[in-house]
Amino acid sequence: MSCEHAHDDAAYVLGALSSTERAAYQEHLATCAECTQAVRRLSGLPGLLSRVSLDVLEAPAPAEPVPDTLLPALVAQARRRQRRRSWSIAAAAAAAAIVLTGGAVALGGYLAQDQAAPPAAVEQPMTRVADIPVTAEVGLTSVDWGTRLDLTCTYAEPTSGDGQEWPYALVVRTRAGGSERVASWVAKPGRTFRLSGATASPAEDIASVEIQSLDGRTLLRLRTS
């Protein structure tokens, strides 16, 4: 039976969920292999869309209005055809935005059959640079559109009290001095989270990967060789 969250993967990757929905979906990912795999398959979407010219996404020119002097039935039929034509143009623009040379993503939210996602790289342990009960490992996989990042993050059980939830962000720093937030989540005590992020930067241009608090404080870091 298909998971009830099966249609939330694309919205999650593209940041279209509300903060409450996103937190609930991230908690769901920790226990659902099907959704986790779907998110990994779609993790390249942000990188793909960042390369698309805004001209591709411009709305089509409005159709010429149908004269109201035609018979009512003919007016209704003509307008239905115009609506279908507008939807077809919009779908073509969306396809052009998603399908790029070197990789293709199906509009339904899945990779094309002949464009299987490359296997994830071996995750490497991140170094803790702040006194927090969190450990993490991250793998960087080179793909045609940039780099996919697969993260496993564990928040230890609190030694006393109920513990506290913390929002974190996964940040990529490039050798040219740039930085980019590629994922965010809410860490909960005693839980392990697995999530994926994406950047258009090639793996060889990445100097480090960091887990940060939302105020920009670095908590864990992996320096690339």
Image: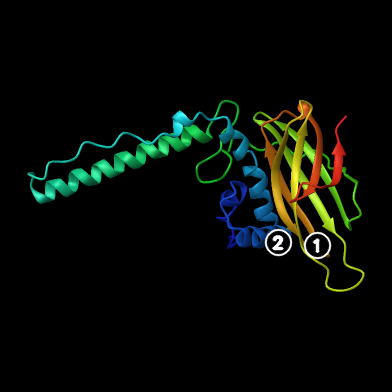
Q: Which of 119 and 212 is in front in this view?
A: 212
Q: Residue at x 92, y 54 (%)?
A: 131
Q: In which quarter of the image is residue 204?
A: top right
Q: In the picture, which quadrant includes the C terminus?
A: top right
Residue 115 visible in the displayed image: no
220 left or right, relative to 70: right
Q: In the picture, which quadrant includes the N terminus?
A: bottom right
Q: Do the residues labelled 2 and 1 touch (CB within 8 Å)?
A: yes
* Amino acid beneath label 1: Arg
Q: Which residue is drawn at 30% across and 43% down?
A: 84
Q: Which of 133 and 30 is in front in this view?
A: 133
* Amino acid beneath label 2: Glu
Q: Residues within 10 Å of mark 2 (few under 14, many from 20)?
A: some
Q: What label does residue 191 carry, if any?
A: 1
Q: Nearer the viewer, residue 41 or 175?
A: 175
Q: In which quarter of the image is residue 179?
A: top right
Q: Nearer the viewer, residue 37 or 84?
A: 84
130 left or right, relative to 43: right
Find disc 2 in the rendering and name its residue. 27
Residue 110 % position (x, y) = 57, 44
